[in-house]
Structure formats: structure tokens, C-alpha cells
Image (tube, rainbow, N blue to C red):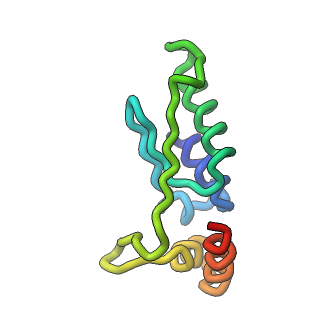
């Protein structure tokens, strides 16, 4: 799960070694389906599939057809936490410690959706 969290953060553009980013990164692994919140879908699907297969340590056939990754994006403004709505700008601002950088990142990221 630590490696999956690293992949999630890296694909979201965050530093996986940053404790502030790690404390709010959530990765859920369910069998038989995996659910991940992430940004760059093709790359994260490939990397997570490989990580899951490697983590099984040959306990099962190394077959990517057995791993399903669902990249569910959460619309901006629907993240509730600490008793309030948190936007992408709020979350990124928290992680990088700079509200202006958080806003700028969020504007770029959301424009690509």
C-alpha cells in the first residue's frame, strides 16, 4: 500500500516523501476490484497494475488481465473534511504550504478536465 500511495502522489504531481501529502493521500485496495483516486489515468493504471502483480510475489499468475483499476475522479468542491468543503486549491495549498500555488495548480489541473 505504501508503494501504491507513492504512485498516487507521484502521478498527482506531489512528492511521495512529503509527510503533509502522505497524510491526506488515500488509496483503497479491494479484491477483486481496486479503487484509486488519481490524475493521469493511463500511466497510473499501468503502474498500479504492475505494482499489484509484483506485490503478490508470484503467489498468483503474473497476468495483467486479473487486475482492474478504477480511476474515479472526485469533482472539485465535493471533498468534505474537517467539517467543511475542501477544493483542489485548498488541498494543494495545504500540501505545498502556499494557498496561491494551490490555486494556480488547481486552475491548470481543472482546465485539463
Nearer to us in this view, 101 or 17: 101
Residue 30 percent across, percent down from the top left: 38, 36
Compared across the picture, whether 42 is left or right of 94 comes to right
Residue shown at the point (59%, 19%) measured from the top left: 63
Compared across the picture, whether 92 is left or right of 83 comes to right
Residue 62 percent across, percent down from the top left: 59, 17
Nearer to us in this view, 104 or 72: 72
Residue shown at the point (68%, 81%) measured from the top left: 104
Vertical position of residue 58 compared to residue 17: above or below: above
Nearer to us in this view, 54 or 44: 44
Residue 9 percent across, percent down from the top left: 61, 55
Vertical position of residue 63 compared to residue 74: above or below: above
* The residue positioned farthest toward the bottom in the image shown: 100
Vertical position of residue 29 compared to residue 13: above or below: above
Nearer to us in this view, 49 or 13: 49
Quadrant location of the C terminus?
Answer: bottom right
Amino acid at each position: 500500500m505504501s508503494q501504491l500511495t507513492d504512485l498516487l502522489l507521484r502521478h498527482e504531481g506531489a512528492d511521495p516523501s512529503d509527510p503533509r501529502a502522505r497524510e491526506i493521500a488515500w488509496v483503497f485496495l479491494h479484491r477483486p476490484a481496486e479503487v484509486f483516486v488519481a490524475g493521469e489515468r493511463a500511466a497510473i493504471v499501468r503502474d498500479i497494475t504492475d505494482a499489484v502483480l509484483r506485490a503478490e510475489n508470484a503467489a498468483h499468475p503474473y497476468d495483467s488481465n486479473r487486475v482492474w483499476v478504477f480511476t474515479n475522479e472526485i469533482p472539485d468542491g465535493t471533498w468534505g473534511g474537517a467539517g467543511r468543503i475542501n477544493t483542489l486549491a485548498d488541498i494543494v495549498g495545504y500540501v505545498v504550504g502556499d494557498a496561491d500555488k494551490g490555486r494556480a495548480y488547481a486552475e491548470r489541473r481543472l482546465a485539463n478536465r
